[in-house]
Image (spheres, helix red, strand yellow):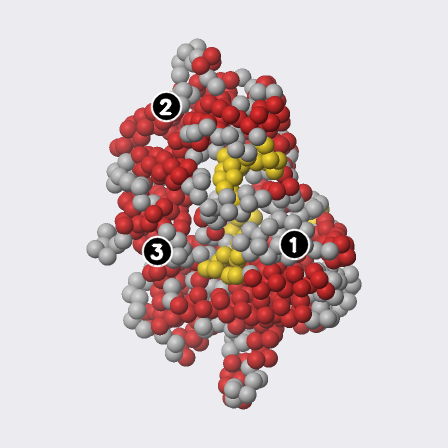
Amino acid sequence: MSFTNILRTFALWLILLQLGVYKSQSATVPQVQLYAEKLSLSNNTAYVRDVMRQAKSAEMRNYMQPEVNRCDDFYQYACGNWAKINPTEPRNLLETTFFEQLINTYNQKLLKVLMEEPRKDDDELTTKVKTFFGACRHLDEKQSEHYKLNLREIAKEFGQMPALMPTGTWKESEFDWLTTIARIQNKYGIDIILQLSLREDFANKTANKIFIGQPALPLQSRAVYKSPATKWHRDRYEEEIFRALQSYLGISEEVAKSTAHDILYFESRLADGMIDKRLGKTLKSMAVLRTVDEMQAAYEGSIDVRKYLSISMGQTINETFYEYHVEYQKNLVQVLKETPKAQVANYIIYKLVKNFFFNYNETSGAKEKLCLKKTKNYFAKVLDNIVFRKYNSESTAADINLIWLKISEIFKEELESAEHLNWLTPNTRKLALEKLAAMRLKINTYEESNLRAEYANITLSSTNYTENIKQIHIQQTQWALANLRQAPSTIEYPLTLSLTPAYNRNENLIKIPVILLQPNFLWSTHYPNALKFATLGCLVAHELIHGFDDMGRNVDVAGNELTWWDNNSTDAFSTRKNCFKRQYSLFRANGKYLPPSELQGENIADNGGLQLAYSAYAKWLRGLNDSSTTALEREHLLALETLPNLNLTNHQLFFLAFAQYWCNDVDEHFRDKVSLINIQTPAKFRVIGPLANFPTFAEVFQCASGSTMNPKQKCKIY
């Protein structure tokens, strides 16, 4: 445990011990955090408040490196000791972040629910989740032979994997790659080589449309598959495949090694056709409306889309569909011509059975974490709903909604002001106000979702983990096929939306995960509001700005992808966007310039979000002077806006809290590859960039003009 976490844990443990709430003297940070959360919400004594504030102050001070000139490098000033306190080694992590602490405590809550004995008041969904988790947790060495046999049977169902068969016995003439992936898609809904999905039609929002195109690949970008700088990641990935082939399928070392190499090579060839996300292309701009005959002709029969759709969908499809990112399919045709069929078959079957892999030889603690990860994969929405109902009070949700109200009010004022955003023409400004007025914020509690119906037909075993995975895939696929002719439903990525806020352009909706409702991390009734606005506020404001960034501004109030900005506003936006492109391309991480990117949405949202959140905080402070607040109350509230032993004003504390949210340590092999692997700017520059562009920051810290944190040329859109 890091020194800061020890200190924080000790302070919280001391309160709990003295108040008789907690008896154990050996507690982890997440365990103590759960007790502290319960205590802080139910006990608002001055004593509890003061010790909680002391603990938060100690945590923030320990991350800092105060001897660094904050006008030279505010990130180092705020986060200079983070890597010493939260190192990636010896924990074998690629990265440590503040958000990881949130995840760890949230996972403790999930494990507490999942490991409870069945209760009489458990609803059907809770029982199913516990059953799935229990079957996973109890898979061990005793069941290993039966488990491996199940995996081989799954592989055999779709024509067998050459690597699993004696040399010379696999029949190449009986293998058809497209039929195989279509059969897998029809039964399990797993995308292999091609992705098949149902989405809202661009031309008719009341109807679903079939989309066919590039699937997601594990290493995420062409650069990671191809760049010499990311060879370590490819080697690690290949080793993972090799170990899996040996451990789970019982393939000999020599065959497993060559097969793993072939699988990675084939996938890297597929990656040659991947879209570069930095180009900022939308799905609509990449999609081509096709008939079956048109796509057949486009690839001269090399991709028999009629057969693919018929098998995958279980019915004859005569309607039009969308093919997206045509370059991927063009590349695919060439790759398939040049790759031996046995290698393609090994790849397809590996990608299928990979969904069922589980390391049953792990220690009990590690196995619990693995089983939790698996349970999240399939029941993320259910878990978020359970935790929200069990742990969160109405006040926590109200807190986020209040932040949203304050921030949206500030942006509305800026849009209405003749001084602010004066580069927008009146008509574009009017349409932007309409979009903002229609924009909503929703906490992802899934209280309104029909989760019971979605999981109704899934029957789970308390002892057969592999069969459970099969049943979930089968039932979810049947659910999707049954909804083909229904009105479109919201496109969701539950696992992602369980972890991070997101703006949905099609719905003009900001979604906030339940994980952010946990008090005593980003916010607390005991902490200054400066911390709340600097963290929750910036996150919410960031998502709001996505509605008006380089992608969001091309989607109107109703979620239609079209141009609603006039030419003058578009030209002015492009000029300001180019400022960000130049500025961020001059940042250097580990001695290398950040790669240029046409997509600047994250940088625009980081910069605009910070300034919106700060303005909302400043407005809240001004509100303390209204007639309903006495002078004594104002003095008390302002005193609470600083922290003990931190010689910082409330405004300075806001910027420190903002910066520390992005503190991180990155593994040495990962460090100089972050800009290749992630589309977002490295964490340091998510601090440096927005603060350097914000004149108020320079005023608050008295940074001289021309210093690193107060450059003469600043970039701003919102």
Q: Quadrant of the C terminus?
A: bottom right
Q: Is residue 337 left or right of residue 162?
A: right
Q: CA distance from mark 3 to mark 1?
A: 36 Å
The number of discs equals 3
Which of the two labelled residues, at mark 2 and mark 1, occupies the earlier sequence position? 2
The residue depicted at 53 percent of the width and 66 percent of the height is 404
Which of the two labelled residues, at mark 2 and mark 3, occupies the earlier sequence position? 2
Residue 620, image x and y in percent? Answer: 57, 76
| Kind of residue indicated by mark 2 | Glu
Q: CA distance from mark 2 to mark 3?
A: 36 Å
**Residue 109 seen:** no
Residue 547, image x and y in percent? Answer: 61, 56
Judging from the image, what secondary structure is the residue with disc 2 in? helix
Q: For the residue carrying disc 3, how many other residues have a C-alpha within 10 Å: few (<14), some (14-19), or many (20+)?
A: some
Q: For the residue carrying disc 1, how many other residues have a C-alpha within 10 Å: few (<14), some (14-19), or many (20+)?
A: many
- For mark 2, what is the residue? 157
The vertical placement of 371 against 76, above or below, is: above
Q: Are marks 3 and 1 in contact (CB under 8 Å)?
A: no
| Kind of residue indicated by mark 3 | Ile
Judging from the image, what secondary structure is the residue with disc 1 in? helix
Outermost residue to the left: 120
Task: Please name which of the two marks, 3 or 1, marks the residue nearer to the observer.
Answer: 1
Q: CA distance from mark 2 to mark 1?
A: 48 Å
Q: Is residue 4 left or right of residue 476?
A: right
The vertical placement of 652 against 686, above or below, is: below
- For mark 3, what is the residue? 386
- For mark 1, what is the residue? 553
| Mark linked to residue 708 | none
The vertical placement of 668 against 713, above or below, is: above
The residue depicted at 60 percent of the width and 35 percent of the height is 289
Between 691 and 85, the residue placed more toward the observer is: 691
The residue depicted at 39 percent of the width and 31 percent of the height is 187
